Structure formats: C-alpha cells, structure tokens
Amino acid sequence: MAILHKPEVDQWYQDLQGRSLRVVAIDEDAETVDVQFFSGEIEEFEFDSWFQLGVEPIAEPEDWSGPFDDLEPDDMGDTEIPRQSGSWDQNLDETDFEE
C-alpha cells in the first residue's frame, strides 16, 4: 500500500510518472492543491486527485531554472559576486530624515 503524502506549500514532489512538481497553494475551503511542474505547467488538483497521483517528497531540484525554458545562463546573473558591496548602513549616515 502506498503512503499518502499530505500536500505542503513549497514542498517538491515526484509523481508516479517521474514528473517533479512543487505545491504552490492549497485551498482548504475548495479542497484543491495548486502545483507547478518543473516544466513550468501549472495545474490544480482536487484533494482526492492529489492522493491518486502517488507523489513522494523529494529535495528541491538543483537547477531551479527548469520552468524558464527561454532563460539564458547570462540571465541568472553572477551568483558568486555580491550584489552590493560595503556596509548596509553606509548610505544611512548621509540621509536626512524628516522628524
């Protein structure tokens, strides 16, 4: 018997077809689960349908750019270089605050 996994927002899962998906929203009143597949497709499932998917929790994919098929490597920016240098309060000393 398969283990039924209750959906959790921002948790990644893999279904029986091998597709990776992330839960993006849960509507308790409407009893629906909104998911985004790694390919970018968004789909809504009723609770009953969710449990029929046979999903298993997985770790977040290392390559988060899967849903962005038109994203170029340069679009991701250089993650090795900090976006801002210096101290965070560097400009606060030069700012006049109204009292």
Image: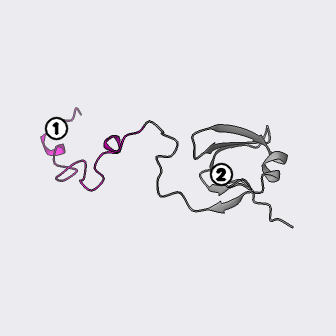
| Residue 92 screen position, x and y as percent | 19, 44
| Residue 63 screen position, x and y as percent | 46, 53
**Which residue is labeled 2 in the image?**
19
> Toward which corner of the image does residue 1 lie, by quadrant?
bottom right
Most extreme residue toward the left, as rendered? 94
Q: How many marks?
A: 2
Q: Is residue 43 above or below residue 56?
A: above
| Residue 41 screen position, x and y as percent | 62, 38
In the image, taking residue 37 as reference, residue 61 lies left or right, namely left
Mark 2: amino acid: Arg
Residue at 78% across / 57% down in the picture? Answer: 54
* Magenta run includes residue 2: no
**Which residue is labeled 1 in the image?**
95
> Toward which corner of the image does residue 72 lie, by quadrant?
top left
Residue 80, numbered circle: none
Q: Which residues are magenta?
A: 71-99
Q: Give the Cα distance between marks 2 and 1.
A: 51 Å
| Residue 9 screen position, x and y as percent | 63, 50
Mark 1: amino acid: Thr
Of helix, strand and loop, which one carries label 1? Answer: loop
Closest to the observer, 81 or 95: 81
Residue at 25% across / 48% down in the picture? Answer: 83
Closest to the observer, 67 or 45: 67
